[in-house]
Amino acid sequence: MKDTAGRIIYVGKAKSLRNRVRAYFRRTSPYHPKISALISKISNFEVLATDSEMEALILEANLIKQHRPRYNVNLKDDKRYPYVKVTDEPFPRVLVVRRVKKDRAKYFGPYTNVKAMRNTLKMLRKVFPIRSCNHALPSSRKIKICLDYHIKRCLGPCEGEVSPQEYGEVTKDVLLFLSGKNSLLREQLKERMRGHSAREEFEKAAQVRDQLKALESAAEKQKVMDVKQPDRDIIAFARSGRDISAVALQIREGVLIGRQNFHLAGLKESADPEILSNFLRQYYMHSAAIPPEIILPSAVDDQRMIEKWLGSRRGGRAKIMVPQRGEKVKLLRMATYNAQLSLDELLLQRSEAKNRVPGVVEVLQKDLYLSVPPRKIGAFDISNLGPADAVGSLVFFEDGRPKKSRYRRFRIRGVEGQDDFAMMEEVVGRYFAGLVREKKEFPDLVLVDGGKGQLSSALRALKGLGIKKQTVVALAKRIDEVFEPERSAPLMIRKGSASLKLLQRVRDEAHRFAIEYHRMLRKKRTIGSELDLIPGVGPVRRESLLKHFGSVERIRKADLDELLKLQGINKRAAENVYRHFHP
């Protein structure tokens, strides 16, 4: 579903397209607030047909991930989370990647705890001699063997020191390790060690023994839940308004091997089954380790189809469970508690970020000797190039960044001639009178473009409104002197300092905004006066002419036939326009 701008705002699937689309436009029953908001923005539909429900399920998940529609639940910023990739090569490598490709490689993740992931890879490279180079192997050119081979971190496939079959055994071990199948891996390693010993290959047997010791040491550090449990993922979430935090606990062979936190972007009105359905499809989209059991806090949309899809990716049965009692409910409570902690942390970080004063604002406070940090700055400028079209501007900066929703522009009404001081007094007075009338918050700092005269005018305007505690400074253009009230000498801030650069940026933005408005008014007046001189051309025909030709210059160059073809312009008016420009 698309809006008027052609943006995709919702992706859905349907067995019966007719019934699904009709459901959005019934008049018999009230809609959910989310659906009502969606319907109000739908302008167009685009349809993709698939051969099966399974294909539709996968396509929907891919399109949501690609386009991130406003009215779907999305895994927020999951493109930034890294994956561990085991490449599909004769001599595979283990890589950390941010993008998942359809290249037959095995992907594990996404990992939200990057530090823990890198520690796991560090241990993996110590235990399993898998290559870390980027050479395309086998290669026809001569490749010099590296240090990893000499310290027994690589088997040397670049110089043919190992066969693809022998190297493949190491790759299988790595896949088992990344999948959390440590018990199976240890049994296989013990069997391999006994085989080497029986063949009197004692050096190889010792290497396998060292691998076993490293694995057993790592296993001792993990939290054991219950060795009889099957592999399972426990998924839960917590929500506050639009913020949703999801947690996936991974249990393999009775061992809690990891916890992953995700922030989901959704709507307040999104239902729990929809959130879980979207999360499952996006989380397991590229995962190479899908357990036979997935425990959820509530039922999920399309459960049968999702189980079928997960089973096809896993190569065996995958069951979604919603427990009501027993040990699984305890695991679910633990996951929910972790999700709530993650959400609380997210909201706390956001609150701290909102209240944190940017460094440049703190420096400006210090350089101007202000009692409070100037987080909100309002800056005024006047643009006046002649007796007509004099204007003023107000730009607003918050925490060092422009906030364009609070920009204002003013046409000078009460000043004749080119009196910049009086114009500044009028603009400042009108702006603050509006703030007082609407009971809005004042800026922490007012900056006026100019010197002592402009500063005095701004202060006079504030005094006339009875405003006494507003901080006002002026920034002169010549050598960027800062003038403050009740201070005869200007304040010289060090050239190149962050605070002076901020003041210059705010001043320049006010100047740009004022000039832009002045040019617009002058152009409008110039164009209007030229066409208004033509008999039979009023506001409607003038607008029609400008809309068709784009400018007065193009109207001037148009021949009579072009003018006659224009809708809304009769023969007499067209002849008048032509004679005006071609007397």
Image (cartoon, rainbow, N blue to C red):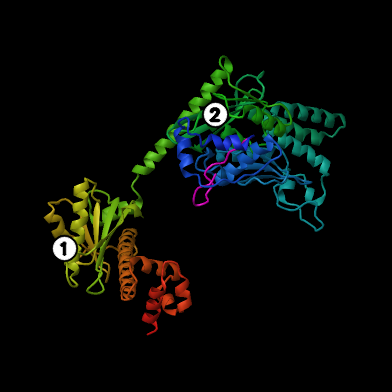
* Residues at marks 2 and 1, CA–CA distance in whole angstroms: 62 Å
Q: Are marks 2 and 1 in contact (CB under 8 Å)?
A: no
Q: Residue at x 18, y 53 (%)?
A: 433
Residue 37 lies left or right of residue 93; in this view the side is left
- Image x and y of residue 387, in percent: 22, 74
Can you tell which quarter of the image residue 152 is in?
top right
What residue type is disc 2 on?
Pro
Q: Residue at x 79, y 40 (%)?
A: 168
Helix or strand or loop: what does disc 1 sit on?
A: helix
Q: Residue furthest front?
A: 571
In this view, the residue in front, 541 or 261, is 541
Residue 522 lies left or right of residue 13; in this view the side is left
The disc label shown at residue 519, or none: none
Look at mark 1 in the image and give the residue it sits on: 457
Can you tell which quarter of the image residue 130 is in?
top right
In this view, the residue in front, 417 or 539, is 539
Residue stretch in magenta? 1-14
Camera-near label (2 vs 1) is 2
**Residue 403 visible in the picture:** no
Can you tell which quarter of the image residue 118 is in?
top right
Look at mark 2 in the image and give the residue it sits on: 273
- Image x and y of residue 352, in percent: 37, 40
Verify whether residue 24 appears in magenta.
no
What residue type is disc 1 on?
Ser
**Residue 473 visible in the picture:** yes
Helix or strand or loop: what does disc 2 sit on?
A: helix
